[in-house]
């Protein structure tokens, strides 16, 4: 299918091969450059490997059939992720501009793609940095023994713990009440929680300083932020495997359930996860590739990056579930001991009579002899499976499950510091790509005065973003973060990815693209790439997008709240969103997605008007 | 003679039994979890340990109500179970058929809880007085929150970094300004050429013209 739309003036807008060769030889361009290839690879790895690899992928893996989930994940990684990755790398390296510049060079009508990427990067960056602020808060608080989330405050009498803490747990209380001071609904903004403002300030300042001179500073920072997480994961893996119950967690994660492969949701979730894992359509990867030398082998880079992402996802999942298994085993043992104590106390039996090994038989024996008494005791059922599957995704994993597990390890402050430094590095390295995807397009769109140095651009962006993100420091901040996470980082990315594929294959021209790759790396891309770019990847993205929209439209929008007054407390209550949320959702998801057609339309009208004026002016002297 | 002694003994034990009844109004149930607390080093609960308990409790009562000399015989124990839990009541030393009220006993136990616990190498959780909740240890609350200290360190480092960067960029600019007068003469010639040619190019990306000039110039 060689459907290529007419695209006049393309050769005038992009550098031709001679110019590129000359640029490469003389290094005459004023564009920043990577110091070495390792810096580029580490930056891309850091960008792709983010907090989602630690707290989203393991949950998906376990809930969609364990080891069997790896099959759709790896297949879609290769069919959907890798082609898009190579597309972004190659187009950036060839056209040597940021995301707005690249799409504007391909066709001025397509500048909307760049604008949409910038908007998505901005919205995602806002809430992502809030997550980093929370991680920093926990990191700062890890330098004390005992850890503050291992104890409950006392009530006024001093006889009991505060009821909110008593009913839930110390870690829940610390996260929802002490750190965030959550209100009970998104509409109830409450007041600004100042420790959070302080942490947001710290987060934005750190990012600002790391990126202050563009990639010349962030390129040095990635040596730490991209490599440290792997080291920490290794340390946690070794520690985790020596803990009791770790293997049960890993078993739980990888036990394959082949029936899950038949369900479409498994494949959809795998596809969506691959898409977000690669940070495609944020514009950062295009920018990073544009700083490469012209003959850099971007195909090799794409394959390497895919392999690293796949490996890291599995590696992080193993570590995560070893710790989850440990925590679940501890809780299970605690539950059993409690029940044993209750039985011993009620029946006045000596302590050795009931142990963990004969608990079941003794319980049945007592139940048959004295059923009424046993019923009155209200013995809790201890369910290992339930303990392994609770709260293992997202913020719940990092701030509740993991912190609880850490308090049970000897030497907890050290483990806590290590864990949160790892999350911090993972998050900051992703944010570098984010900021790149915001600052460079703003520069290309001439939003800043030309005289300003790079430092001023970064500084202004960070200050403005900090002020906007104070929204997340309110008492309802947690719910806003979840809202942004669900809507700003989902549909817009899929639509932008789809437009990118269509733009390169049909507007830039797949033949021209193949020639470019031949010029850059020495050989044309093989038939695999051709088929994926033209048919497979767009089809996969379209299917995921349609299914996602259909399911979202059918469901009522609800969210989980921390409400001490609700019936289900301490479980989070599921509450419907207020009606004005639809406007916010449209802003978050609709505006970036619609930026592409709207801008194209605006440009069309604008150029039509200009042509009419031109024609009028030309005709006037004749009159 | 012996019959009288025998009769008195029976009477006293009967009276003691009447005073100490489980779930009676002025007593408390005690529960010890020795094996949970001490594991392999657990001691066996026997009459000697019980004697120690009654002596410790008499000590606690003496501390609470000064002036009255409580003896071991004033602490009456009943309803022992293999769990190691029993019921106890305290009689007044002046009138052995009268029980000391609940509140005083609770006060006494609360005050001397630590001493009672350490006599048996147990803790508040493993030596329980059912009905007397232990005063919970207040959570550790340092005066300066440690997180502010770490935050201060991080912001200090970041601030120092910003100052260093700004200073280095200012120094670089100064150096460039010093070098500029030397380069200006060479620059002017090329600039004049490029200005003449850019008028013809009209904004189309076209570097090759200006660079050709440079080559032919040489």
Image (tube, coloured by chain):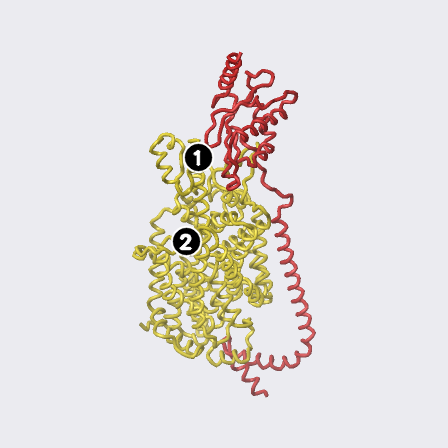
Chain colours: A yellow, B red
Q: Is residue A384 visible?
A: yes
Provide the secondary structure element on which disc 2 rests. helix
Residue B155's label in the rendered image is none
Q: Is label 2 on the same chain as label 1?
A: yes
Q: Position of residue B207 (x, y in %)?
A: 52, 79
Provide the secondary structure element on which disc 1 rests. helix
Q: Position of residue A606 (x, y in %)?
A: 44, 65
| Chain letter for the residue marked with disc 2 in the picture | A
Q: Is residue A279 visible?
A: no
Which numbered disc, 2 or 1, marks the residue closer to the eye?
A: 1
Please tell me whether residue B215 is drawn above or below residue A278 in the rendered image.
below
For disc 1, the marked residue is: A342
**Distance of mark 2 from mark 1, alpha carbons?**
35 Å
Image quarter where the C terminus of chain B lies is: bottom right
Which residue occupies the foreground of this view, A7 or A209?
Answer: A209
Number of marks: 2
Q: Residue at x 66, y 79 (%)?
A: B183
Q: Position of residue A582 (x, y in %)?
A: 41, 49
Neighbourhood count class around disc 1 (C-alpha, 10 Å): few under 14, some 14–19, many 20 upward: some
Q: Position of residue A584 (x, y in %)?
A: 44, 50
Q: Quadrant of residue A57?
A: bottom left
Which residue occupies the foreground of this view, A306 or A170?
Answer: A170
Q: Residue at x 38, y 56 (%)?
A: A254
Which residue occupies the foreground of this view, A357 or B112?
Answer: A357
Which residue occupies the foreground of this view, A287 or A365?
Answer: A365
Please tell me whether residue A498 is drawn above or below residue A530 in the rendered image.
above
- Mark found first going from the N terminus, 2 or 1: 2
| Chain letter for the residue marked with disc 1 in the picture | A
Please tell me whether residue B191 is drawn above or below residue A469 in the rendered image.
below
For disc 2, the marked residue is: A59
């Amino acid at each position: 299918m060689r459907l290529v739309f007419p695209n006049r003036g393309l050769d005038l807008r992009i550098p031709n091969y001679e110019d590129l060769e000359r640029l490469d030889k003389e290094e005459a361009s004023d564009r920043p450059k990577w110091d070495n290839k390792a810096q580029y690879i580490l930056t891309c790895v850091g960008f792709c490997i983010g907090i989602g690899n630690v707290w989203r992928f393991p949950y998906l893996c376990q809930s969609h059939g364990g080891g069997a989930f790896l099959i759709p994940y790896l297949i879609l990684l290769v069919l959907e992720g890798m082609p898009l990755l190579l597309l972004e790398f190659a187009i950036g390296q060839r056209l040597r501009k940021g995301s707005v510049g690249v799409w504007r060079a391909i066709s001025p009508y397509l500048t909307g793609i760049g604008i949409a990427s910038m908007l998505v990067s901005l919205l995602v960056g806002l809430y992502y940095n809030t997550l980093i602020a929370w991680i920093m808060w926990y990191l700062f608080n890890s330098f004390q023994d005992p850890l503050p989330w291992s104890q409950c405050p006392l009530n006024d009498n001093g006889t009991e713990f505060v009821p909110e803490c008593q009913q839930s747990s110390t870690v829940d209380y610390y996260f929802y009440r002490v750190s965030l001071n959550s209100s009970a609904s998104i509409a109830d903004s409450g007041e600004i929680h100042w420790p959070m403002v302080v942490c947001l300030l710290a987060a934005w300042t750190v990012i600002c300083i790391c990126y202050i001179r563009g990639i010349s500073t962030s390129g040095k920072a990635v040596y730490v932020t991209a490599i440290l997480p792997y080291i920490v994961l290794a340390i946690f893996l070794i520690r985790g495997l020596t803990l009791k119950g770790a293997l049960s967690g890993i078993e739980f994660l990888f036990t394959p359930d082949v029936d899950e492969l038949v369900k479409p949701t498994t494949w959809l979730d795998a596809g969506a996860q691959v898409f977000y894992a690669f940070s495609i359509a944020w514009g950062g990867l295009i920018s990073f590739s544009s700083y490469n030398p012209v003959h850099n082998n971007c195909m090799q880079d794409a394959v390497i990056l895919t392999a690293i992402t796949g490996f890291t996802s599995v590696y992080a999942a193993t570590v995560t579930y070893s710790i989850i298994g440990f925590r679940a085993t501890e809780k299970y043992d605690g539950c059993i001991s409690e029940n044993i104590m209750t039985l011993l106390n009620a029946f006045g039996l000596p302590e050795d009579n009931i142990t963990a090994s004969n608990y079941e038989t003794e319980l049945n024996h007592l139940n048959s002899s004295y059923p009424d008494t046993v019923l009155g005791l209200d013995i809790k059922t201890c369910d290992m499976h339930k303990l392994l599957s609770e709260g293992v995704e997202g913020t719940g994993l990092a701030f509740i499950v993991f912190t609880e597990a850490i308090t049970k390890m000897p030497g907890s402050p050290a483990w806590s510091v290590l864990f949160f430094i790892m999350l911090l590095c993972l998050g900051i390295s992703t944010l570098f790509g984010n900021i790149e995807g915001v600052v460079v397009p703003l520069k290309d769109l001439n939003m800043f005065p030309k005289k300003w140095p790079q430092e001023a651009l970064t500084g202004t962006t960070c200050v403005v973003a900090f002020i906007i993100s104070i929204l997340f420091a309110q008492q309802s901040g947690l719910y806003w973060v979840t809202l942004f996470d669900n809507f700003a980082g989902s549909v817009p990315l899929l639509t932008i990815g789809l437009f990118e594929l269509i733009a390169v294959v049909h507007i830039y021209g797949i033949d021209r693209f193949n020639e470019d790759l031949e010029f850059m790396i020495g050989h044309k891309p093989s038939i695999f790439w051709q088929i994926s770019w033209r048919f497979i990847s767009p089809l996969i993205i379209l299917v995921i997008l349609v299914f996602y929209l259909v399911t979202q439209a059918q469901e009522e929008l609800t969210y989980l709240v921390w409400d001490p007054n609700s019936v289900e407390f301490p479980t989070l209550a599921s509450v419907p969103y207020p009606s004005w949320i639809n406007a916010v959702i449209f802003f978050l998801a609709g505006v970036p997605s619609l930026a592409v057609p709207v801008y194209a339309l605006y440009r069309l009208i604008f150029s039509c008007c200009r042509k009419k004026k031109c024609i009028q002016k030309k005709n006037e002297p004749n009159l | 003679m012996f019959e009288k002694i025998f009769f008195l003994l029976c009477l006293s034990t009967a009276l003691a039994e009447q005073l100490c009844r489980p779930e009676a109004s002025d007593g408390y149930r005690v529960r010890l979890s020795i094996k949970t607390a001490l594991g392999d080093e657990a001691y066996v609960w026997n009459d000697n340990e019980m004697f120690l308990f009654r002596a410790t409790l008499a000590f606690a009562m003496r501390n609470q109500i000064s002036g009255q000399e409580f003896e071991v015989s004033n602490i009456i124990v009943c309803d022992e179970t293999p769990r190691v839990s029993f019921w106890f009541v305290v009689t007044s030393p002046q009138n052995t058929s009268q029980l000391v009220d609940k509140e005083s006993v609770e006060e006494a136990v609360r005050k001397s809880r630590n001493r009672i616990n350490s006599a048996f190498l147990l803790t508040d959780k493993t030596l329980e007085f059912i009905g007397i909740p232990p005063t919970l240890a207040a959570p550790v609350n340092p005066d300066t929150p440690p997180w502010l200290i770490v935050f201060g360190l991080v912001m200090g480092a970041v601030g120092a970094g910003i100052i260093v960067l700004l200073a280095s960029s200012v120094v670089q600019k100064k150096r460039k300004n010093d070098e500029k007068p030397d380069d200006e003469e060479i620059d002017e010639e090329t600039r004049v050429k490029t200005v003449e040619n850019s008028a013809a190019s009209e904004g189309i990306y076209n570097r090759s013209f200006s660079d050709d000039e440079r080559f032919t110039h040489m």
